[in-house]
Image (cartoon, rainbow, N blue to C red):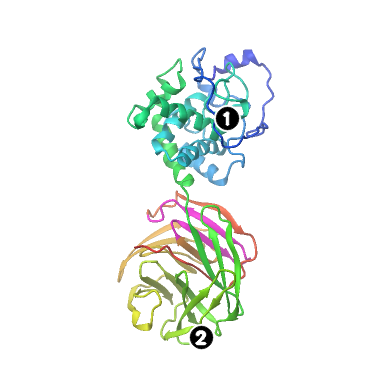
Amino acid sequence: MLRSVLLRAVVTAAAVLTAIGSSAVTFPAAADPQPSQEPQAELRLEPPATSDITAAYQQAACDPGGTTSTDAALATRLNSTLNDKMRGYMSAYRVSCARMVIKAVHDRGLAPRAAVIAVATIIVETSIQNISEEVDHDSLGLFQQRASWGSRSQRLNATWATNAFLDKMVRLYPNDGWKSARIGDVCQAVQVSAYPDRYQVQAGDAQLIVNAIWPYVDGPEGVASVYGVLADGRLTYTSIDAASGKRTHGAVVSAAALGFTPKAMATLNFNTLLVTKADSGGMLYRVDIRTNRDSLEFEPPVYLGNGYTHDLLAFDGKGHLFGIAGGALRRYTIAAAKPALADISGNTLIGSGFTLKTLTATGPDWVLGTTAGGQLISYRIAGAGSWQRHQLRDATWQGFDHLLSPGGGVYYGHHSNGSLHRYFDADPFDGQDDDLVGRGTVDTTGWVQTLLSAQPATVT
């Protein structure tokens, strides 16, 4: 455990400060060898000074990949919501450290309470810093683990150190006893501190930190299936891993073209599209995909009917098709996986004034769109003349000409420069924007389709 800044000044009067994450650390494989003996208790010689929060200790990176823009945004949010010693002191680096601890708990399959216990511990021990110098005896890392816990590189590996902490916790509390024990008592049982009362004080803020970060480590799963139309009428298919944003199936392009200029498109399921024809009085076609594996082949488009003059289409995976024409939002009921005209009913006018530039569905009776002014707006549709509007962003989304969602809070925005950007909304149905974050790009160029649509999550 850390001594006070005064004690540190006696030990090292003129230490050269290192930038966050600048210490060279070798991160071992995920193996978690058991220490040869029970880790030693960590004894603090005197109470820590409040200035320990800003003390200039040498630090190792917690995430080998560094900090993210989301880390910085969460730090700003937490600085105004925490109540104790870390209020106003959270940084992108400290959030990245907490994130790695929370992710280790999540990946192990333990409940969030285990993350609260671990985060309360590192608040007390190091003010959420991966300290790479031996300030107190031979203690190192987020948890200030002594040499008996593991090697230097292991203790400075945030994931390894967290798992070592959790290993001892579950040994001391069999049958999930840590779930009901007082948080401060569990921290003390693992750490064996000379100041046992300090952990419980930080339990409340640890809970707030876990609440804020957990949604970002508990990310989306599955594969997004994305269909597109090229300027010459040929179709494309691409699949994207929702968690990583990496393409799992490179774009395959059909040899055949649709035979008409499409205006709007919606993906009903893995092998069925609905497409409207431009300048035709609203002719609606069904396109049946034969294969999209090594090549993309489809049956000749099946004409369904007229009157579908929509500029935008989106299917919600639960039987409702939404279309916008002239600012009017309409909802149709689709009663078959490969519908004929008789399987499309309803034609319910939800309302007017839906002047959206893009449209997608995020879940049953939820649609999401952007405006020319850059607003991102989510709508909960109840019925004719009845909806709830949630403005998630006031600006900055005007560059997207297509918006896609395969469900699960995953959004993809297509930019006119050919880039495809991904976002994750931890709760797409809460009407809030504080859990919506950018997660980089799928590709910076190459998406040259004139229309794009993702297969929605099928809800049963």
Please provide percent x and percent y for residue 289: 50, 75
Crowdedness near tag 1: few (<14), some (14–19) or many (≥20) residues, C-alpha within 10 Å: many
Can the viewer see residue 366?
yes
Crowdedness near tag 2: few (<14), some (14–19) or many (≥20) residues, C-alpha within 10 Å: few
Determine the secondary structure under disc 1.
loop
Mark nearer the viewer, 1 or 2 = 1
Please provide percent x and percent y for residue 356: 46, 69
Which residue, given by chain and number where applicable, does mark 1 sit on?
Answer: 130
Question: In the rendered structure, which segment of residues is drawn in magenta?
Answer: 407-429
Measuring 42% from the left and 26% from the top, which residue is drawn there?
Answer: 171
248 w.r.t. 150: above or below: below
Compare marks 1 and 2 and give the one earlier in the sequence: 1
Between 186 and 417, the residue placed more toward the observer is 186
Between 110 and 411, the residue placed more toward the observer is 110
Specify whether residue 172 is painted magenta. Answer: no
148 w.r.t. 407: above or below: above
444 w.r.t. 93: above or below: below
Q: Quadrant of residue 384?
A: bottom left
Can the viewer see residue 145?
no
Please provide percent x and percent y for residue 352: 37, 73
Determine the secondary structure under disc 2.
loop
